[in-house]
Image (cartoon, rainbow, N blue to C red):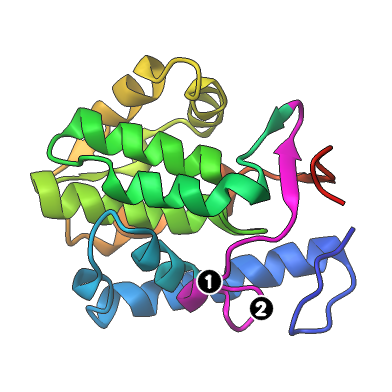
Amino acid sequence: MVLKNKLGITNSVDLAREEERLSKIKAIELFETGLLDNLEAGKFESLSKIHKYLFDEIYYFAGEIRTENIAKGSFRFAPVMYLKVSLEHIDSMPQSNFEEIIEKYVEMNVAHPFREGNGRSTRIWLDLILKKEIGKVVDWNNVDKEDYLLAMERSPIKDIEIKELLRKALTSNVNDREVYMKGIDASYHYEGYNIFKSDNLK
C-alpha cells in the first residue's frame, strides 16, 4: 500500500526515496534557521511542529494526529481512541534528567502519534529535550541501527536496554550538524505498519 501523498507518487520505493530526500532538506533548514531551538522541549505541540515541517511537502497529514490504529508486527501502538489522553500524559511527564527523558521518549514511541514519520521526528524531539535539559544529544553515529530497533521494540516492557544504548552515545556536541542529521536517517525508523480496526471502533 502506498500512502496518499502530495507528490502523486504511486510506487512505494519511489515514495520512500523522495520522502527521505525532502525530509532531510527540511531537517537541515529546521536546524540551521534556529527554528528548532525556539520550540518548547518535551511537548507534543513541538513534536507536531517538527513533523509538519519535515513532511508538509509530502503528506496531507503532516503534523496531524493519526486517525488509524497501527501496528508493527504483533505490537499495537496506542489506540486512536486513547491517543489524545496518552499525549496529554506524556506532556506532563518529568524530564529533568536522562532517565526521565528516555522514559518520556519510550512513551512517545508507544503513542506513535502520526501515520508515518514518527521515528525521525521523535528523534529530533528527543535531542531537543536532551539539549535543553542536560546539555547533551545522542550521537547517532555511535548507535547501531539493529541494536536500536530491537531495544525500542522491547522498551515498552523493559527500557534498561535503550537507556544504556543511548547513554553510551551521548555527546556534548549539541550544535554539530552531522551528529544531528544522523538521527534523521530513515533506516532507523519502523517500516511496514499494519492498519487494523479496534473491536471498539465501528
Q: Position of residue 166 (x, y in %)?
A: 31, 31
Closer to the eye: label 2 or 1? 1
How far across and how far down the image is residue 105, in percent?
A: 38, 40
- The answer to whether 153 is drawn above or below residue 181 in the figure is above
Q: Quadrant of residue 18?
A: bottom right
Checking the image for residue 170, the label placed there is: none
Q: Earlier in the sequence, mark 2 or mark 1?
A: 2
Q: Main secondary structure of the magenta part?
A: loop
At x 37% / y 80%, what residue is drawn?
Answer: 29
For residue 5, above or below residue 201: below
Left/right placement of residue 146 relative to residue 102 reads: right
Residue under label 1? 63
111 or 12, nearer to the observer: 111
Q: Amino acid at mark 2?
A: Ile
- Residue at (84, 37) in percent of width and height: 199
- Residue that carries the numbered disc 2 in the rendered image: 58
**Magenta part of the protein: which range?**
52-74
